[in-house]
Amino acid sequence: MQLPINIQELFTGRVVEWERLEFKEGWNPESVLHSVCAFANDFHNWGGGYLVIGVAEKDGQPVLPPKGLVPEQVDAIQKKLLELGNHAIQPAYHPIMVPATVDGRQVLVLWVPGGQTRPYKAKLALAKDAKEWAYYIRKGSTTVQARGADERELMSLAATVPFDDRRHHTASLNELSRDLIVGFLQQIGSDLAKSAQTMSLAKLGRQMNIVDGPEELPSPRNVGLLFFHPEPHRFFPQTQIDVVWFPQGAGGDLFEEKTFRGPLGRMVREALDYIRRNYLKETVIKHPDRAEVTRVANFPYAAVEEALVNAIYHRSYEEREPVEVRISPDELAVLSFPGPDRSIALEDLRCGKAVSRRYRNRRIGEFLKELDLTEGRATGIPKILRAMRDNGSPMPRFETDEDRTSFLIRLPVHPKVRDVVETTHDTTQVGLDVNATEIKVLHELAKALGVATTQVTTQVATQVGKLLNTAMTDARTRQELQTAAGMANREHFRKFYVEPLVVAGWLARTIPEKPTSSLQKYRLTDAARTWLASLTATAPTL
């Protein structure tokens, strides 16, 4: 048995938070039983948790190298847990048990997903004459007995499983794509990727906890279809991201729209990449009294990423409404349905202090975290606030209605960037000397690349022009092109200039089979030469 995570990362804090992870130095069946019961009850819809037996902890951190277990213990513990799962927990529950090696020592990892038939109760003690049972839940990093209001709330969760973790009874097992599953496992570095190609789809799905049901009729869970089906919108209509650009503002008559669909992880990444390439830009502000320049973004990427991932994480997949990203010269807004839980005060949300009592999609968050798209545990809103503040942007606005039917995150444009956009035809605003023909040619080039023309400042247009002119006569290295464009940030230049031009067919690599070769150069393509020459010949001179 293998886990769909990289086990080593359980010891780095990257995969799960402390509310979902517990270390135990030795085998104490009573203590382990209570923790298994608590994780199975999944009181906050976190998706359950992990227990690592054979590793001590100090101040919330694992003590490494671990004390470990002897092989005989590992086998005996697994047999005892099977027995306890049948007789000491009601309803019966069995965690997924995986022996592992950490720093040369044997440990046992228990994966305890949130149960489908909660609430669960466990025996208070394992003595032969013990007859008392109790409900257990997780409070922070501790397993505690549910009492009073907590016990009543746990009772209210009986048979209520979050939508993303439910079985999809009308879908067959073959709806899951093995290629998508294997790709995911390889991306996150899971040991399960090695055997995923040869394992039966039913067994693979059960090990990843995305398949449920009897052996004779297994079916995928909703989260499995959302991440590992090529077209999840077939099962969940309007599972998509609509990116809408309003060049004249939200009240204007013109707009451009692009829709993204597909497995959730890929859909989010493609939408973010499209937004970054077409609508996010950096402005360089020169100061007359010093040599240093100030670089600001119209919308900081970190804030945009968090806002969009937050919408995908917390939206309802039972509602037939897409996630919408509305972009105008004044703001970028992300709209999703429904709104935040009623337990969250809007004022706390605006201050970045909101902590959700219970998550709507416990498994979606788990997969997004594995893909490094979210940190979870209510860190998204503070990260948006921090990114906007660090960029010098106005503070974002968070809007919902009294009934919490929708949630809108508004990211205002940086005022300095807006000033440049409004005066992009006036070269004196950015201190450049280019003629109107060159500007028109380069703006047309921006259209060919899929970049909104109103988002292209004269400075960006000139940088692209210098880059292309340098490649006109001979193949050039990335450094030569960057120097010609007058840009300092290597990664920014590669992502937002060179790569889009290669994808669009304007630049070609001299060593296409080795994109990262140290000998790599770039040349202007024949198609680009012909198009630019014809456009220059017909462009009006003003």
Image: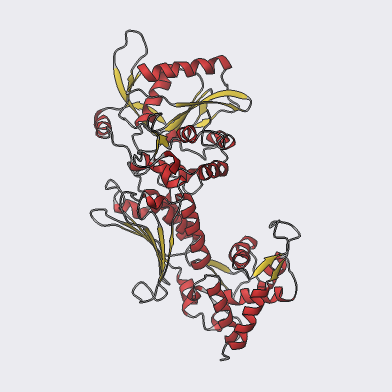
Q: Residue at x 35, y 26 (%)?
A: 144
> On the image, which quarter does residue 466 sit in?
bottom right
- The single residue placed furthest to the top in the displayed view is 129
Residue 320 image offset from top left, x and y in percent = 31, 54
Residue 151 image offset from top left, x and y in percent = 26, 29
> On the image, which quarter does residue 517 sit in?
bottom right
Tell me if residue 287 can be seen. Answer: no
Dividing the image into 4 quarters, which one contains the C terminus?
A: bottom right
Residue 53 image offset from top left, x and y in percent = 50, 23
> On the image, which quarter does residue 474 sit in?
bottom right
As drawn, is 490 to the left or to the right of 542? right
Q: Which residue is drawn at 56% across and 90% down?
A: 540
User: Which is nearer the eye, 319 or 42?
Assistant: 319
* Rendered view: 148 above or below 535: above
* Rendered view: 452 above or below 99: below
- The single residue placed furthest to the bottom in the displayed view is 542
As drawn, is 20 to the left or to the right of 523? left
User: Which is nearer the eye, 463 or 370?
Assistant: 370
Tell me if residue 63 can be seen. Answer: yes
Residue 312 image offset from top left, x and y in percent = 40, 52
